[in-house]
Image (cartoon, rainbow, N blue to C red):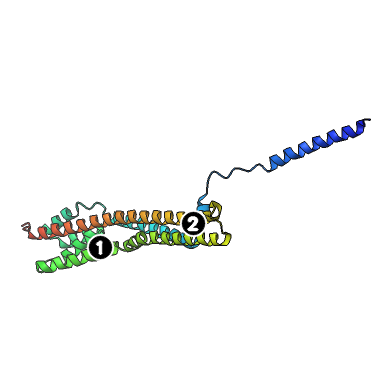
């Protein structure tokens, strides 16, 4: 004997079970991982104890490089006609006018020539010594900060290496806690290891490049000072206009 109501209830129950199973499949479908990692994420993976010093080093490098480039660019600005103007005044016997030209120019070369003009009439060795002293003082003034660039270029990779060691320690510590060497367990230490190594190398490379640029500009300034000193001493050997 069949019971229509019971059969209908059984059919409704089966349909409800199918709907619940379909819903479970939709809910349990894994979501795709994010495609990108932000800079902040990378810094957090590397560890603030290592990344903050590296960030400070990078800021110091940028500041010193910009400040030194601006100062050296101003110091090596075109003063090609300086010696021509000074020579004309000196040959005319107008030493005071020549000193005014140097004072108004305001470059390291001009200050060195000004010191030579102030020593005119004294032995050649004394003039050379005075100008050489001024040149050394000018170079030391413009070399300020370049030592820090060299220090950062050497120190930053070492900080990255320390981060690498800390990452390896973290890997073995996580393994000891879980007794498992799956990628999920060691990934945190690997992130720190790789991020700190890369960051230290990047900061070190940038600092070395900046050190090279500033050193090249300093060498150019030194060559200009030497050339100006030689031109001034040659000028003193020329006969004065009658």
> Which quadrant: the N terminus?
top right
Choose the circle earlier in sequence order: 1 or 2: 1
Q: Nearer the viewer, mark 1 or mark 2?
A: 2
Crowd band around label 2 with a 10 angstrom C-alpha radius: few (<14), some (14–19), many (20+): many
Q: Which mark is residue 7?
A: none
Real-space Cα separation, disc 1 to disc 2, in angstroms: 42 Å
Taking the spot 21% from the left edge, 65% from the top edge, the residue there is 134
Q: Using the image as rendered, state which of residue 103 and residue 107 is in the foreground.
A: 107
Q: Which mark is residue 139?
A: 1
Q: Do we see residue 168 in this rendering?
A: yes
Crowd band around label 1 with a 10 angstrom C-alpha radius: few (<14), some (14–19), many (20+): some
Looking at the picture, how far across and down is residue 23, in whole percent? Answer: 73, 39
**129 w.r.t. 73: above or below:** below
> Which quadrant: the C terminus?
bottom left
Looking at the picture, how far across and down is residue 238, in whole percent? Answer: 7, 57
Direction from residue 77 to residue 165 in the image, left or right: right
Q: Secondary structure at mark 2?
A: helix
Taking the spot 77% from the left edge, 36% from the top edge, the residue there is 18
């Amino acid at each position: 004997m069949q019971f229509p109501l019971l059969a209908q209830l059984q059919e409704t129950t089966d349909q409800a079970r199918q709907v619940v199973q379909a819903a479970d499949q939709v809910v349990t479908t894994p979501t795709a991982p994010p495609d990108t990692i932000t800079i902040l994420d990378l810094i957090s993976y590397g560890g603030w104890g290592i990344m903050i010093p590296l960030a400070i080093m990078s800021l110091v490098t940028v500041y010193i490089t910009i400040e030194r480039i601006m100062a050296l660019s101003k110091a090596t600005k075109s003063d090609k006609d300086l010696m021509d103007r000074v020579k004309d005044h000196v040959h005319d016997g107008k030493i005071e006018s020549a000193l005014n030209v140097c004072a108004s120019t305001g470059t390291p070369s001009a200050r060195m020539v000004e010191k030579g003009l102030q020593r005119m009439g004294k032995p050649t060795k004394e003039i050379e010594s005075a100008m050489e002293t001024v040149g050394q003082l000018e170079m030391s003034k413009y070399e300020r900060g370049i030592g820090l660039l060299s220090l950062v270029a050497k120190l930053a990779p070492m900080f990255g290496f320390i981060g690498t060691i800390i990452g390896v320690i973290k890997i073995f510590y996580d393994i000891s806690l879980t007794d498992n060497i799956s990628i999920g367990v060691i990934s945190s230490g690997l992130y720190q290891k790789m991020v700190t190594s890369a960051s230290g190398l990047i900061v070190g490379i940038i600092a070395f490049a900046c050190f090279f640029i500033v050193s090249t500009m300093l060498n150019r300034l030194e060559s200009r000072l030497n050339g100006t000193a030689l031109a001034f001493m040659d000028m003193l050997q020329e006969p004065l206009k009658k």
